[in-house]
Structure formats: C-alpha cells, structure tokens
Image (cartoon, rainbow, N blue to C red):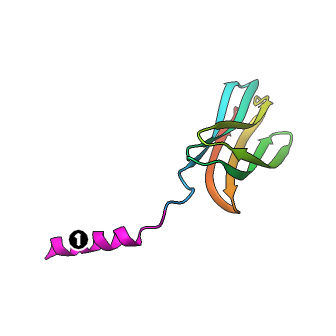
C-alpha cells in the first residue's frame, strides 16, 4: 500500500512539475584576487543556455572602513550569447584600511531574478 502511494505521488509530481525556467541556465559569480593592498574584484556572468538572452544586472558594493562608508551601485543591460562567459565589471581597491567589503551581483530577466552571488570580505582591523 505504501509503495502504491509513493508511486502515485511520484506520478502526480511528474505531471505538476514546473516547466524549465531560466534559473540554472545563467550563473553569476564574484571573483576576488590579489593582495590586501591591491584587490581585484570582477563580476562574471555565464550563459549556459542554448539561446541568446537580453539581461539586466545590478552590481552593489559596500566598502566600510574606519574613515568612511562607501556604497556604489552599478546597473546595466547586456546581451548574453549562448555559451558565453561575460566579464561585466572590474574594480581595484586597497583593502588595508577596509573593515568589511560586501559585493553582490544580481542578474534579472524580465524583472525576475535568475542569478545572484555575493561575497563578504572581512579586512584587517
């Protein structure tokens, strides 16, 4: 009886499963390289789908230090060709006086979030 119920639930789940969406077809990542006195931060998008897409992105960076708190927001639109890896933005900064650095990339298609990545860097105090 239990096996019949499990098979029934699996069968129902198969027919009610959502159709493939854009989630998982686009990957976003933040790459940080370098030494404390010269960090390089890059936002990279990878289109894993078999179609070209017009996408929007928001790159937000919070840099908190002993001296000041700085927030930058960069927005843009781009075309992601199928199978392409796109480097959207690169920033260089000195993180010796940074207490905390937060970077977040959000990728949107038709005002729906399809990929997000974020990094928090705790600097020397």
Query: Residue at coordinates 79% horizontally, 30% vertically from top-left?
Result: 93
Give the vertical position of 117 relative to 9 (above or below).
Answer: above
Quadrant in the picture for residue 112:
bottom right
In the foreground, 2 or 123: 2
Percent from the top left, x then y, of residue 8? 25, 74
Quadrant in the picture for residue 103:
top right
Residue 2 showing in the rendered view: yes
Specify start and end residues of the magenta stretch as a single range.
Answer: 1-19
Quadrant in the picture for residue 30:
top right
Which quadrant is home to the N terminus? bottom left
Task: Report the residue that reaches farthest toward the right.
Answer: 67
Which quadrant is home to the C terminus? top right
Percent from the top left, x then y, of residue 75? 80, 50
Residue 125 showing in the rendered view: no
Q: Which residue is mark 1?
A: 6
Query: Residue at coordinates 76% horizontally, 28% vertically from top-left?
Result: 96
Could you tell me which secondary element the residue under label 1 belongs to? helix
Task: Report the residue that reaches farthest toward the front.
Answer: 51
Task: Report the residue that reaches farthest toward the left.
Answer: 1
Query: Residue at coordinates 72% horizontally, 41% vertically from top-left?
Result: 101
Query: Residue at coordinates 73% horizontally, 50% vertically from top-left?
Result: 57
């Amino acid at each position: 009886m239990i096996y019949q119920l499990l098979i029934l639930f699996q069968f129902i789940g198969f027919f009610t499963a959502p159709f493939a969406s854009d989630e998982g077809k686009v990957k976003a990542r933040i790459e940080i390289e370098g030494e404390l006195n010269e960090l390089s931060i890059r936002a990279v998008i990878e289109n894993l789908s078999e179609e070209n897409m017009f996408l929007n992105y928001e790159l937000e960076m919070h840099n908190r230090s002993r001296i000041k708190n700085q927030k930058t927001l960069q927005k843009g639109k781009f075309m992601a060709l199928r199978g392409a890896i796109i480097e959207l933005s690169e920033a260089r900064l000195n993180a010796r006086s940074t207490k905390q650095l937060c970077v977040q990339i959000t990728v949107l298609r038709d005002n729906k979030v399809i990929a997000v990545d974020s990094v928090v860097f705790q600097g020397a105090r």
